[in-house]
Every structure is written in structure tokens, then in C-alpha cells.
Image: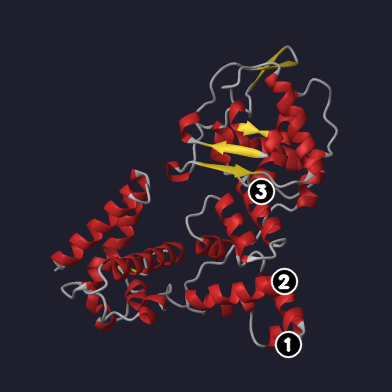
Amino acid sequence: MVNRENYLLVKSYLVYLSQVSQLDARSIGRYWSYLRHLLLWADETTFSQSATVEPAFPAYLAEVRLDGKAGNLSPVTMKKITQTTKRFFTWAKMTYARKFRGLPLAWIDALRAPRGTQPAEDHRYVTLDEVRRLIALDVPEGDLASWRDQAAAALLFVSGMRVGALGTLPIEALDLPNRAVKQWPSLGVATKNGKSATTYLLDIPDLLSVVGSWDAFIRDHVSPNAAWYTPTDHNWGEQRLSTEPVGSNRNVAIARRMRKLFTTANLPYKSPHKFRHGHAVYALQRAKTMADYKAVSMNLMHDDIRVTDGIYAPLVSDEVRQRVGQLTGQTTARLAANGDLAELIRGMPDIQVSQALVVIAERLAQ
């Protein structure tokens, strides 16, 4: 039987996520579905005594039976459940310090998806060289759609915005002279969880030039509140900008157009979201201080620098290994012999990861 105190605590956390973190209803529903497993696991034991529950939560997830089937949870789902559970307990210990003083931080930090179920990470991202190949393609005169797509590819990379934001971005939200993007839902920009922020573009002149030429063209032909990724109409082989509002499947249309662009450039296709990964990797590889690292995290509209580290640390693990080897006098081979650096970082408590990043950043700045 589910402990009523635990149930009310989970509901309080969901209210916190809704009112303070301002997550949308769909995200709240997803978190609730994840935390239901925690309630069932704890049964009648209060959450403050979770460290005493057997089997441990990861082992329980590995044996979850849904519809009479063992191991019905996918590796990705188990990873999301444990990440959500970890954030929940961190919130509970901070919010109800007295009640949770007996729950060790080490126990919370040790929460991981069951061993052997970790999904293979997709470490692909769009590189600057690939973007340059895309924008270097010859576009026939009058082919507005292809011109727009090249500009969109460049903007996705220098901005790091999500494809949903690009598809709904009005012209007035892009301030090129200041290299700023107003990702404001009040302007109609669709952002994750309805967040609002002004973000900034990487200073890569050749990419900004492509973005700027398209931007100047559309400002002369459509209104400021029209979509920057403007739809086009085709009539007897001629193209013109459309004044129609963008459709609900704009993300799908952009992905389809990007696929065509990659094919024309004879490059393996990477989704629009991989431009965001490319933006992050490019910026993080050039970060020299913790202030730089934090700026990249904020520009990606992440709430916490640990979110940035969790997503992008695997992408730059080779870069980190090389730099740490140089800083400590170790060779890449010696580091490899001691195990993968990304695995070592993932095994550290959060506070040690933060301290390590500070030391690395300070040494890089010297």
C-alpha cells in the first residue's frame, strides 16, 4: 500500500515544478508517471527511510513487471526514472531538511539506472565544417526555399536554439546587430516548458553573413511579425514568400528540408537538434573559465550547469581527456589505461565534479 505521506510529498514536488520551475502540463504528467514507480517501490516506508528499503531502487526497476511481463521498462525509461528520482530526493532534502536529515546525500547521489541497461548514447553532432559545406552549396537564382534552408542551418548552429523555436521565430525576435535572439513566448516563440530568455549568437563571421543576407531580404518583403523561416509558395516554377501563418507541423517540414540539404551536400543526415549539440560542443571546447561554462549553459536555456554537463560531457570527453592529460603531465594513453574519463566523471559526486571543473577551468585560463 502506498504511504500517504509519500504520496502528498510527490504531489507537493509536482506543484513546485509547475509553479516555481514553470514546467508545462505535459512535462508534469511525465514526471508523475516516473515518480509513481518510486511510490510503489517504497510501499509503506516513508521516503526519509528510503536507504533501508530492499531491494534497492535500481534493482527494483530492473524487475518491474507491467502487464505481467518482466523487464518491461526500456533502458531509456529507467534512466529517466532514476534521474527524476534523484532530483526529487535532492529537492526533498533541501526543502524538508529536518525530516530528511537521516537520508544520506551519498545514497541520493548513488542513484543510477540498473547496470547493463544504460542506453547507448548518440554522440553525433553537426560540426562547423559540415555547416560550412551546407552553406557553400550553389543555390539556383530564385530558389528561395534552398536559400532559406542554408540560412536556417547557419542560424541553428550559431544560436543553439531548438528547432521548435526556429520554426516559430518571428523576424522581430532576431537582433543581428547585437547578435541576440529573443526567445520569448510573448512573441510567439515556442520554447521548451515555455521558458523566456534572450540568447546570443556565436561570432562566426561566414555563418553570420549567410544569416544576415536572408534576414535583410525577408525584412524587405514581409512584416516584422512574420516567421523568420518563412514559408514559400510555388507557382509555375517560380517561388515567392508566403504570408500564411506557419503550420503545426513546421518542425517536421524543417527536418525534411534539412535532410534534402544534407543529401545535396553529400553528407550523412543529422537532425536539426544535432545543430544545437554542435553549437554546445563548439562553445564548450572554447570555454576557458567557469564563467564561460556558465554562459554557455545559460545560452542553452538550461536551469542548471549540471544539466549542460550531463548532456554534453560525453560529446566533449575526448577534448577533456586531451586537456586534462596536458594539464597533469599524463599522456592520453595513461588516461585511457585508467578508464574512460567520462565514466570517472559520472561516478563522482556532484560536488566533486564542480570542484574538478573549477580547477580545470582555472588552469586553462592561465
| Three-letter code for the amino acid on which mark 3 is drawn | Phe
- Horizontally, residue 365 falls left or right of residue 184, namely right
Relative to 137, is 185 on the left or the right? left
The nearer-to-camera label among 3 and 2 is: 2
CA gap, disc 1 and disc 3: 33 Å
Estimate the x, y position of residue 344 in percent, counting from the top left. Answer: 58, 80
Q: CA distance from mark 3 to mark 2?
A: 26 Å
The residue under the point 53% across, 21% down is 245
| Residue 275: numbered disc | 3
Q: Which mark is residue 334?
A: 1
- Looking at the rendered structure, the secondary structure element under dot 2 is helix
Give whichever of 43, 85 is nearer the camera: 85
Q: What x and y, as percent, mark residue 242?
A: 62, 17
Amino acid, disc 2: Leu
Which three-letter amino acid code belongs to the residue tagged 1?
Answer: Arg
Is residue 313 left or right of 52 when viewed as pictured?
Answer: right
Nearest to the eye among marks 1 and 2: give it: 2
Quadrant of the rendering where the N terminus is positioned: bottom left
